[in-house]
Image: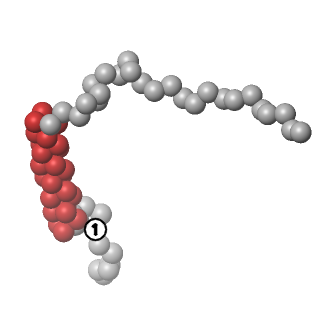
């Protein structure tokens, strides 16, 4: 008797191809980002010591 269940060790080739293409596209995007960062560095991006402080809380106003 044969069963209609698919074996667990089957590989979905379409899904594997999509994942591989995604990984390749992501790697290419990272290379382009690094090239742009080297060519056009953003001002103030590297200095982590100059972080903005949060807003100071004000004391509540007295109601008239």
Reading the image, the residue beneath label 1 is 7
Instruction: Please state which of residues 18 and 59 is positioned toward the viewer in this rendering.
Output: 59
Residue extending farthest to the front is 64
Q: Is residue 47 above or below residue 55?
A: above
Residue extending farthest to the top is 49
Residue 24 image position (x, y, % from top left): 13, 52
Residue drawn at 13 percent across, 41 percent down: 36
* Quarter of the image where one finds residue 60: top right
* Quarter of the image where one finds residue 43: top left
Instruction: Please state which of residues 29 and 48 is positioned toward the viewer in this rendering.
Output: 48
The number of numbered discs placed on residues in the rendered structure image is 1
Tell me the quarter of the image containing the N terminus: bottom left
Residue drawn at 15 percent across, 54 percent down: 25
Question: Crowding at label 1, few (<14), some or many (≥20) Cα neighbours within 10 Å?
Answer: few
Tell me the quarter of the image containing the C terminus: top right
The colour mode here is secondary structure
Instruction: Please state which of residues 36 and 22 is positioned toward the viewer in this rendering.
Output: 36
Residue 46 image position (x, y, % from top left): 27, 25
* Quarter of the image where one finds residue 31: top left
Residue extending farthest to the right is 64
Residue 27 image position (x, y, % from top left): 15, 46
Residue drawn at 28 percent across, 68 percent down: 7
Q: Is residue 47 above or below residue 13?
A: above
Element at label 1: loop
Residue drawn at 18 percent across, 68 percent down: 14
Instruction: Mark yes or no: residue 20 visible.
Output: no
Instruction: Mark yes or no: residue 53 visible.
Output: yes
């Amino acid at each position: 008797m044969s069963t209609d269940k698919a074996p667990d060790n089957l590989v979905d080739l379409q899904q594997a191809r999509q994942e591989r293409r995604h990984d390749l596209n992501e790697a290419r995007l990272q290379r382009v980002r690094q090239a742009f960062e080297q060519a056009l560095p953003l001002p103030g991006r590297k200095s982590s010591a100059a972080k903005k402080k949060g807003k100071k809380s004000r004391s509540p106003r007295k109601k008239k």
